[in-house]
Amino acid sequence: MMTRRKLTLALGATLTSVASEKKTDGRIRFCRVPNGGFQPQLALDDKDVLHLVYYTGDAHHGDLFYARSKDGGASFSSALRVNEGGTAIAAGTIRGAQLALGEGSRVHVAWNGSNDAGPLNPDSGKPGAPMFYTRLNDAGDRFEPQRNLMLHSFGLDGGGSIGADQNGNVYVTWHGIAHSEAKGTGKEGEARRRVWVTKSEDDGKTFSTEFKAWAQDTGVCGCCGMKIFVDRKGGVFALYRSATESVHRDIYLLISNDRGRTFQGKLLHKWNINACPMSSMDFAQNANMVVGAWETGGQVYWTRVTGGTSDPIAAPGEGKVRKHPRLAVNEKSEVLLVWTEGTGWQKGGSLAYQIYDAAGKPIGAAKQIPGIPTWSFVAAVPASDYGFSILY
């Protein structure tokens, strides 16, 4: 099994200052994604090493790269390719890579495939998109060959997700349709969709056959993303958007207290709209709580999901098409909520952010800066000085 020391030796080459436009705003450090990349995904390990996966290239057939930073994102190591060439997709903003750290801080990555290498879609009679997965190898110097984990469901559309813990458990989730619910079986459209889970108990070496996370027939919003997260105690959480009767596009929270064997669901936020908003979700934690974030009606919200739940807290004021919220929590239980403003199909925008105190009250005023590329969003992590780093 890979150890933290092996990972450090394999990737411990001289750090290259490839991040640009570094600047600060009080307690916030801003950094650009290196090498002109976009769609950053971040994870911070127990030694304050920052792990980054980002996207480059064509939005429909692009590539994923991994780098790490020891200085909060001011500089990064040389990048490693994650996927096989052109097998990732960024179009729509919610189908790109997601990142998790497993045992010994091993890096795990999952993403929607850009090709037709997935299971047969009985609706069309053709293969569909795969749900790809890979992990950093034992030597820490390259990623293993990508694998499709989607075997007995079909119709991958919105983005999948990945979570892991330090005990060798890795979870990959997506939403799709069971073969038994293909057209002609009495159910049509998004009402057929379910959240699917596959689990590894050997740190990603092998995975179980996928299974439905929850029996409740809520449907799933087809082109929305979802998010799975594993906390420090092994609790598993997931956020997704329903599509009940095509108009109830509500946010649901799934919770598993038995390491992914069973899940219970909870309605968090209602939204009636007969359309797919192409939204994404996020989780973050510190030692005391887990928080989650999502979009409803052009506004972004966050709430505590452990450590004393709270009502949804909206970003302050009114913005212009607020989407793709991301979270970070420092050891003082202060929460950073950061989101995009004005982004859309083939359209970039701005980032905005707000810090909240441990009681959920805003600290100062929300701020906004331009510079979000097309198809992108931001990522955030806490810093050791109780500040935060934002990559965009």
Image (cartoon, grey):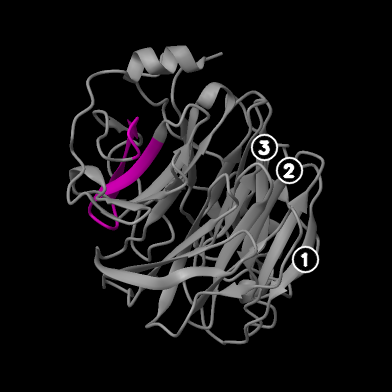
Give yes or no for residue 204 being in the magenta stretch: no
Mark in the foreground, 3 or 2:
3
Q: Amino acid at mark 1?
A: Lys
Q: Check whether the beta carbons of the residues at disc 3 and disc 2 lie within 8 A of each other.
A: no
Q: Main secondary structure of the magenta part?
A: strand
Magenta-highlighted residues: 51-72
The alpha-carbon separation of the residues under discs 2 and 1 comes to 15 Å
In contact (CB < 8 Å): disc 3 and disc 1: no
Q: Is the residue 367 above or below the residue 304 in the image? A: below
Residue indicated by mark 2: 235
- Which mark sits nearer the N-terminus, 2 or 1? 2
Q: Residue at x 43, y 57 (%)?
A: 95
Mark 3 or 1 closer to N-term?
Answer: 3
Picture coordinates of residue 327, whole percent (x, y): 50, 57
User: Residue type at mark 2?
Assistant: Gly
Residue at 73%, 37% in the rendered image: 233
Give, as a three-letter code, the residue at label 3.
Answer: Arg
Q: Position of residue 273 (x, y in %)?
A: 57, 87
- For label 1, the residue is 266
In the rendered image, residue 132, in percent from the top left (x then y), is placed at 47, 42
Q: Residues within 10 Å of mark 3 (few under 14, many from 20)?
A: some
Q: Quadrant of the C terminus?
A: bottom left
Q: Which residue is mark 3?
A: 232
